[in-house]
Image (cartoon, rainbow, N blue to C red):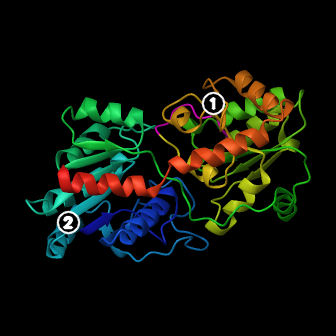
Amino acid sequence: MKILLFGPAYPLRGGMAHFIALLYTNLTQRGHEVEIINFKRQYPKILFPGKTQEESGEAGLPVPSTVLIDSINPFNWILQGLKLRDRNADLVISTFWLPFLAPSSGTIHAMLRNKKTKTLTILHNLIPHEKRPGDMLFTRWLIRFTDYFIAQSASVEKDLLHLVPGARYKRVALPMFSLFKDRIPKTEARKILGITDEKVILFFGYIRPYKGLHVLIDAMKILKKKVNLRLLVCGEFYGDEEKYREHMKVAGIEDGTTVISDYIPNENVHLYFSAADVVVQPYLSATQSAIAQIAYFFSSPIIATNVGALPEVVVNERSGLIVPPNDPESLANAIVRFYAENLEAALTAGASEERKKYSWEAMVDAIEQLAHNG
């Protein structure tokens, strides 16, 4: 098939750019002719909560892209839509994770869609974690001009069928993110990072309220009386960093916490996962999480909350432990148990087995089946 794949790609950074690179690679390996249509402006600077929208390091998985789309300029959508008709594509694929980008994707879908060219939207979520005015209006605009969908979790599938009862779709879990350097021995990673503690837990990724770092801080306050460990927080704060630092100070965990308050370049991600005993995801809400798939790439066990698709991915007592959300005491108890019962080896082995489920072959199969059979 001739495919136009819309979404962020290098030099834009983040999980969605990684997803697009991996999807492009696996579609082309299957023999499809794919062109990535990249953003020349993904978010206006005034609306972007981070420090920069571009990678500061290596691409991880270099892929070519055509930079065309301005997310906030309707004239650009129409102009580029007219130009892209000449590509005569069989399939247009867009990724959806934020309603803000739905008007541009929906408009381009509307302009390219015809008897030959079908449209497919991959839904990372459908109802945003942080709701804003106009979300549903924007979302419905994209849905209106989408022929096929891929839902990446049970909760997204439920939301899709609520909005589009007769949707033509397949449910496929978010595949494993396999574009980082391989895991290295724990002692080596800790030496590079200057960590001398015996026990280390990792919170990784953009820091937003729904990801529950504040709950983990409260759990650490409980833990400091029970077990001596280091909390490694790696990620850019999308919000008030000082609020979290003050929380750590009040909780009395500053000395036991290392904060890397920046986006971690692709070439360094393996160091933090290699250094940690377990990844902790204390989310208050979730559909699915790229962090879990990154953890599985490194065969890292996970302690996560029972929200969204996290318990679909993190199999309780096999590849990790599941706890109630917004419950610092339960989270602390799970971390204590992880060490007291020496669960790392067993859960690491389970994570290594579970990772086999999250193949890109399943994603490409679903895309081909929808495109050929509807």
Judge depth for marks 2 and 1 and give the one in front.
1
Query: In this rendering, would 278 be left or right of 33?
Result: right
Q: Answer few, some or many: residues within 10 Å of disc 2's Cα (few below 14, many 20 plus, some between 14 and 19).
A: few
Q: Determine whether label 2 and label 1 are within 8 Å by CB.
A: no
Residue 42 in view (yes/no): yes
For the residue marked with disc 2, what is the amino acid?
Phe
Q: Measured from the top left, where is residue 199 in percent x and y?
A: 86, 43
Give the numbered dot on residue 316: 1
Q: Which residue is mark 2?
A: 75
First reached walking from the N terminus: tag 2 or tag 1 = 2
Along the line of sight, the residue nearer the viewer: 52 or 108? 108
Query: In this rendering, would 371 be left or right of 32?
Result: left
Query: In this rendering, would 202 be left or right of 69?
Result: right
Image quadrant where residue 133 sits: top left
Query: In this rendering, would 294 be left or right of 24?
Result: right
| SS type, badge 2 | helix
Residue segment shown in magenta: 280-287
User: Which residue does the image show at 32% across and 47% down from the upper left?
Assistant: 150
Along the line of sight, the residue nearer the viewer: 326 or 269? 269
Cα–Cα span, label 2 and label 1: 49 Å
Along the line of sight, the residue nearer the viewer: 341 or 162? 341
Residue 103 in view (yes/no): no
Q: Assess whether residue 132 is covered by the magenta stretch.
A: no
User: Which residue does the image show at 71% across and 39% down from the upper left?
Assistant: 347
Q: Measured from the top left, where is residue 330 in percent x and y?
A: 71, 22
